[in-house]
Amino acid sequence: LVAKRRDDYRPSDFFIDTVDISFILSPENTEVCNIMEVTRNISGCDILKLDGEQLNFVSLMINGRLAKENIDYTLHENGLDINLDVDHATLEIKNTISPINNTSLEGLYYVSGAYCTQCEAEGFRKITYFLDRPDVLSKYRVTIICDRPELTYLLSNGNKLEDTLLEDGRRKVVWEDPHRKPAYLFALVAGHFDRLEDSFTTSEGREVLLEVFVDSGRLHQAGHAMSSLKKAMKWDEDTFGLAYDLDRYMIVAVDFFNMGAMENKGLNVFNSKFVLAEPKSATDEDYFNIESIIAHEYFHNWTGNRVTCRDWFQLSLKEGLTVFRDQRFSEDMSSALGCRIKQVKVMREHQFAEDAGPMSHPIRPDEVLEMNNFYTVTVYDKGAEVIRMLHTLLTPAGFRRGMDLYFARHDGQAVTCDDFVQAMEDANDANLSQFKLWYSQSGTPEVKLALEQNQLRLTQTNKPTPDQAVKQALYIPIKLSMLDEKGLEHTVDEEHLGTFVLSQEAATISLPERLQHGVPVILTDFSAPVKIDYQYTLDEILHVLRFAQSHYAKWDASQMLYSRLIRLAYDSNEDNDNDNNSDNNNDNNKYNAGQIQSLTNLIEYLEQATLPDDVVAQILCIPSFETLAIEYTQLNPSRLQSAHQELTLLLARTAKDCCERRLKEQRVLPYRYEQSEVNRRTLFAVCIRLHVLALSQEGKGNDLLSAYAQADNMTDKLALLKAAQQADINAFDALMIDFEEEFGHDAVVMDKWFALHATAPRDDILSRLDLLQAHSQYSVKNPNKVRALIGSFAFYNTQGFHAADGSGYKYVVDFLMKLDAINPQVASRIITPLLQMNRYESTYKSLIESQLSRLFTQKNLSKDLFEKLSKTLA
Ligand code: B3K
Ligand code: ZN
């Protein structure tokens, strides 16, 4: 197994101009006939090396002549080498594949009565022999022949040219995509669906047919996806002047899918979880995610499809940019602050951890063994943060100029991240050479601030990561202001724009006298993907909370306060552990009066300020275990878990009246997905959880059952279930039975039920997981089920996963041994929490290490797991 390196890129020896591919579909044995026009690109090259995996070769014709093995071509495990000493040729390759046995869900697969493809990154080679690289762009014509009349739709990219019933009773459908595209954007779907139809007229006057295909009986759940699509189409025209370029846009929802969705040209395939919604069964969060993912895939039509990646190392060219675009869209459609907080949580909870672990890589990686391993929070979300910094630095108008130039130059091409930055530079006459280090340097920069008499001193540290020993100073835009003693806010950067750019290792900002005892407000809106180190006192944090103008800064202050208090409890638990003093388990003793008071002050402030519901809700949320974990070295997870729980209980007691009042004030209306109602329900969820916790500490119950029975929507139901899960296990069990009775038939909804079970803090969790794996709705072959059950356990059941005897780790590894043979891509996601091994205290670390070593010796280990394990155990 050899990794590929970015530096080794070479243009393709040959191009494939046209592809005329036919499928005679059958679950066990699909026949593929692929006719290609090839052109030599590099003179002197006389072997065309086509990629091919898990294919049964049948025959090859070169310019109409049957080719002979070992004379005209050689076959090997990873493809087909064809001797081709000409500038042009027509090749006709026949092969067969077995979609029903393809459990990897990559290539063409057949499951629950439908055929579906997934080709990104390198799945087309599991369909036919091809130059399976994104810089080979071809025009496709696709013929699908099927002998099963019950499959009502035979779909592929582009325009439908023909739909005929053949004399032998089989059906034949022909599609043609007028746009040249890389193989990873090819798609084929054949199945029985219900169809929702609508239309959109583009700014250019093109009438586009919009179709959403869902499992039969689910048409009433497709409306939100459709309206999201139309909003996205309009937004991209208004914001970036980008209109759709085909007469038809299709979205198909399937239950078996490795990820969220896929932007195949004109034929998006979606995980049904990100299409289907109705108030009864989908939460506000589901509604939000559907809208943003529909938009994301739609936006790829320009950022990804029209302009694609030269090679897979450039993945962030399309993903970082498209995530940024979908983020801006969501900010415009819903609450900008709520969106920003969600985005920052993803960075702090997942991306910082990835960058602090063995898989740390720049947003443009340098070395890849299995490309599927690089669809990461770094490439996607940190990638989007890098684009956002460009947007900040160049201003929205400057950014738009850069985008316009990028499309003017590169439409129809496969390009690099450098090409993108070059367009931004040229359109703005800017010099981004230092900024570009964000593309090549991995790791999370730490910015330390110190208030020294008459100046602020900023220092950046870029620690070495396993992939890169030497780091350079980055170009970091830091939104910064100072609060004076009265709480008035002042800009302090030289240009008084509110953003200071730290481009050296250290810099100072001089302060006028009235600010020399002020309090800094730092990294407002998370203006750069960095960590901040400033030694606030608790009172200073409260000063920011009270007086900062920005709601984001207020929220961030609350998070700092909570982290600080949790750290205090963690440290004091350590002292207790060392003293072996087991009597001392009253959490109030962990805190002195001043510390407890800071929490009281926070609640008092919330009570007297008139903040919007969603801001209050966000401020009442303690950072997750995973977000906090990154701040600790030699972490003892169970001690952090206790400290987290102690503060949660203290907050519940402190906020008791506040929550009670807010719950009473709730005016419940029939469910509507609109922002003010979403905000209200978000606040309800937070308050009910704290309230139930407060009551249970007093030994009192709460009538969750009747509240649950009255709720007319999934958002409120789930909020009540989560409250019960954390505080009232009897009510939880009763509600879960109720839930199963009501939704047991609905695969998408049952994922919530599996996840709730998997994250319940109970001692018998592993035997529960066994039972749940035997549930009729569960299947190890379905990625949604695996993620809901085993994924939720590994990522979010801190208590069970980090059990001191190592049983949680063993459970997950046993499971991965089975899953890897079925679906390596999903296995490679589920392993993520175990990769943090080196950040734990030695006892935990060695428990994980022995499990990972066991997994590493497994026979036929996938490339996906091999890459991650070899880096972790190195
Ligand atoms: N481009 C796809 C992801 C493909 C993942 C391949 N393992 C979806 C998206 O980012 O829009
Ligand atoms: Zn994407």
Image (spheres, rainbow, N blue to C red):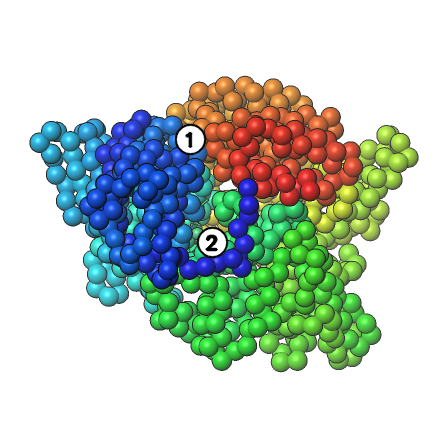
Where is residue 428 shown, x and y percent of the image?
47, 78
Q: Is residue 242 above or below residue 826?
A: below
Horizontally, residue 765 falls left or right of residue 181, namely: right
**Of 257 and 38, the residue lying toward us:** 38
Where is residue 322 shown, x and y percent of the image?
44, 57
Q: Is residue 599 above or below residue 167?
A: below
Q: Give the number of the disc on residue 448.
A: none
In which image quadrant can residue 30 be found? Answer: top left
Where is residue 694 shown, x and y percent of the image?
68, 36
Q: Which amino acid does label 2 sit on?
A: Trp
Q: Give the number of the disc on residue 103.
A: 1
Closer to the chain start, of discs 1 and 2, is 1
Residue plotted at (29% across, 51% down): 266
**Of 281 and 545, the residue lying toward us:** 281
Count residues near mark 2 (Cα–Cα under 10 Å), then give few for <14, some for 14-19, many for 20+: many
Asked whether the viewer can see residue 781, the reply is yes
Residue plotted at (62% across, 51% down): 360
Q: Is the residue under label 2 in contact with that under label 1 (CB below 8 Å)?
A: no
Q: Give the number of the disc on residue 312.
A: 2
Residue found at the far left of this picture: 167
Q: Which amino acid does label 1 sit on?
A: Thr
Horizontally, residue 728 falls left or right of residue 305, namely: right
Residue plotted at (82% across, 44% down): 571
Q: Does the residue labelled 2 lie within 8 Å of ligand 1?
A: no
Q: Is mark 2 on a helix, strand or loop?
A: helix
**Of 766 and 601, the residue lying toward us:** 766
Mark 1 or 2: in front is 2
Residue found at the far front of this picture: 71
